[in-house]
Image: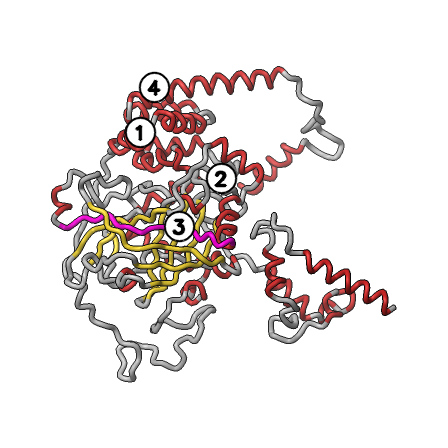
């Protein structure tokens, strides 16, 4: 018996000695092995949620009375509710921790502590995501990507929410619901509906500038690490003298921009629909830390008075020659999250979370966003979501307390009203804050000039233009004819060459689709059982369903 045990022990030791020698495993694939390598022995006793240890005979219900097995009750009552509501947009994503390091003096533009002091490092968390996919969707769709950043500054959390495209889809916050409904799944078919998308694109052409970028090569970056990120809005900054400047932030990837064609993305998707998430995790775990340079495009209050366009319009780019660019620092991601639910899914990013020195954007869209981001996070993760660990600021003293957990210390026994004479938290006077506020009046006139500029100057060569046109044509083939005619007319108004080439491409693609359909129809279908045949048991199924419908209606 001792010999057998000794042999078994030797075999186990041998297996343990070679278990890490296979270097072909990706960091994603060896996550559990890495955990075991860091923890040579079990990390502790298994406990119930109240902390009392689990007895081994209770781990199988056959050994106990189910109604008296507290472990069983704890496990499944928690399991049944372990999911929180999915995000309406940007549901599928991943995240990582890192830091921001200041590399240039920008005190001339802002007194925000996070951006002042060369060499200063500020911890942060970043969530990267696809805009339209559900949690189980694919990373490889042609769509917007998000990059949400939470800076844990000494003056509170600064949240900057970015997109992979430098222009946004609309100006009026009221339009958000309609846009999302058109570009998400059809309520009956549960399929993405190109007819709905093009219908809205022709009726609200303002969204097409963003979609032109998406139809181009920029619509599918080669992973999150190889895309730039843009917060879209024009931010107001103020310096210690109360002087204001207007800026657009740009996060430029240091890995170099790389994109995927539609064919390349389709090939990767067939093998790895989580390609973006896998690429980020593997890079960080291998020590190849992704980094982005942060720079700002700057305008002065005097400069904006001499423009022939609205610099606060989120649907267009600033024109070259009307601004200058200033570098600030580097954002580096150097640590993977340890638990996706805790650190990513519970993350709540709100563009209204600003810090002194960054009064924020002044456009109407931003005013709406700072309202409904709070509302959706209250619904998704609760009204105390800022007390969740990943969302907590470095310093917090507040008169807001109680409610559903987490409440953390709940301000303990401090006074819970203001003003008070018992030394509760007090406000401060920000003498550097500007006294004047700029009011922006926006217009909603349809302006196709940015789309014309994109087609003729942003797309760098005719090969890129052809790929752009091919992607548009592909999306138009399943669209119903009335909407197609409006789409072709709109594209012709943008640029005659664009309209003509899309029209020719559409006609060729449609003819090919019709030919394939004719071949399919000429092939006899397989024999299928008859449906809706009356039987002795009752009327046809569809008649039964109609009768039930009438009963419910009447």
Is there a contact, CB below 8 Å, between mark 1 and mark 2?
no
Is there a contact, CB below 8 Å, between mark 3 and mark 1?
no
| Above-or-below relation of 194 to 322 | above
Let me know if residue 363 appears in the view: no
Which circle's residue, 3 or 4, is located before the other in the chain? Answer: 3
Residue 235 horizontal side relative to residue 80, left or right: left
**Residue bearing mark 2:** 140
Instruction: Indicate the quadrant where residue 430 lies.
Output: bottom left
**Residue bearing mark 4:** 500
- The image shows residue 162 at horizontal and vertical percentages of 35, 49
Q: Which circle, 2 or 4, is nearer the viewer?
A: 2
Which circle's residue, 2 or 4, is located before the other in the chain? Answer: 2
Residue 264 horizontal side relative to residue 487, left or right: right
Q: CA distance from mark 3 to mark 1?
A: 26 Å
Q: Which mark is residue 147?
A: 3
**Magenta residues, start to end:** 286-301
- The image shows residue 505 at horizontal and vertical percentages of 41, 20
Q: Is label 4 in a helix, a strand or a loop?
A: helix
Is there a contact, CB below 8 Å, between mark 1 and mark 4?
no
| Above-or-below relation of 523 to 286 | above
Q: CA distance from mark 1 to mark 4?
A: 13 Å
């Amino acid at each position: 018996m001792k010999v057998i045990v000794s042999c078994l022990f030797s075999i186990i030791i041998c297996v343990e000695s070679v278990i890490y020698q296979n270097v072909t495993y990706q960091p994603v694939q060896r996550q559990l092995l890495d955990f075991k390598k860091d923890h040579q022995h079990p990390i502790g006793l298994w406990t119930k949620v109240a902390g009392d240890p689990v007895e081994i005979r209770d781990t199988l219900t056959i050994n106990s009375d189910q109604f008296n097995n507290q472990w069983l009750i704890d496990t499944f009552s928690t399991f049944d509710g372990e999911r929180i509501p999915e995000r309406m947009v940007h549901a599928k994503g991943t995240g990582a921790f890192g830091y921001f390091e200041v590399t240039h003096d920008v005190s001339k533009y802002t007194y925000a502590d996070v951006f002042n002091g060369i060499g200063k490092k500020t911890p942060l968390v970043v969530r990267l995501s696809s805009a339209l996919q559900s949690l189980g969707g694919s990373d490889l769709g042609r769509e917007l990507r998000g990059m949400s950043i939470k800076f844990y500054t000494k003056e509170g959390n600064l949240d900057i929410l970015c997109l992979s495209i430098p222009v946004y889809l609309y100006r009026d916050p009221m339009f958000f619901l309609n846009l999302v409904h058109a570009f998400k799944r059809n309520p009956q078919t549960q399929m993405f509906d190109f007819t709905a998308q093009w219908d809205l694109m022709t009726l609200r052409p303002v969204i097409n500038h963003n979609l032109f970028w998406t139809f181009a090569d920029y619509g599918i970056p080669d992973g999150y690490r190889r895309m730039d990120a843009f917060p879209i809005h024009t931010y107001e900054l103020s310096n210690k003298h109360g002087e204001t400047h207007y800026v657009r932030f740009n996060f430029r990837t240091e890995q170099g921009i790389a994109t995927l064609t539609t064919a390349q993305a389709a090939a990767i998707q067939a093998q790895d629909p989580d390609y973006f998430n896998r690429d980020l995790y593997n890079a960080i775990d291998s020590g190849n830390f992704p980094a982005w340079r942060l720079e700002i495009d700057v305008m002065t209050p005097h400069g904006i008075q001499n423009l022939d366009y609205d610099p606060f319009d989120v649907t267009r780019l600033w024109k070259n020659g009307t601004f200058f660019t200033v570098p600030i620092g580097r954002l580096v991601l150097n640590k993977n999250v340890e638990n996706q639910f805790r650190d990513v899914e519970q993350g709540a990013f709100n563009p209204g979370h600003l810090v002194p020195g960054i009064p924020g954007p002044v456009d109407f869209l931003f005013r709406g966003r700072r309202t409904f981001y709070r509302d959706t996070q209250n619904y998704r993760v609760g009204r105390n979501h800022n007390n969740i660990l990943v969302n907590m600021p470095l310093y917090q003293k507040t008169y807001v307390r109680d409610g559903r957990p987490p409440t953390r210390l709940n301000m303990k026994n401090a006074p819970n009203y203001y003003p008070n004479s018992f030394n509760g938290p007090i406000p401060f006077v920000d003498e550097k804050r500007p006294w004047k506020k700029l009011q922006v009046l926006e217009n909603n006139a349809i302006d196709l000039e940015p789309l014309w500029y994109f087609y003729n100057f942003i797309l760098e060569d005719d090969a890129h233009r052809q790929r752009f046109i091919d992607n548009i044509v592909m999306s138009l083939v399943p669209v119903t004819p009335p909407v197609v005619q409006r789409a072709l007319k709109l594209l012709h108004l943008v640029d005659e060459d664009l309209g003509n080439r899309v029209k020719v491409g559409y006609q060729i693609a449609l003819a090919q689709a019709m030919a394939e359909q004719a071949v399919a129809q000429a092939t006899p279908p397989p024999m299928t059982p008859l449906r809706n045949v009356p039987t002795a048991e009752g009327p046809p199924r569809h008649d039964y369903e109609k009768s039930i419908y009438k009963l419910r209606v009447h």
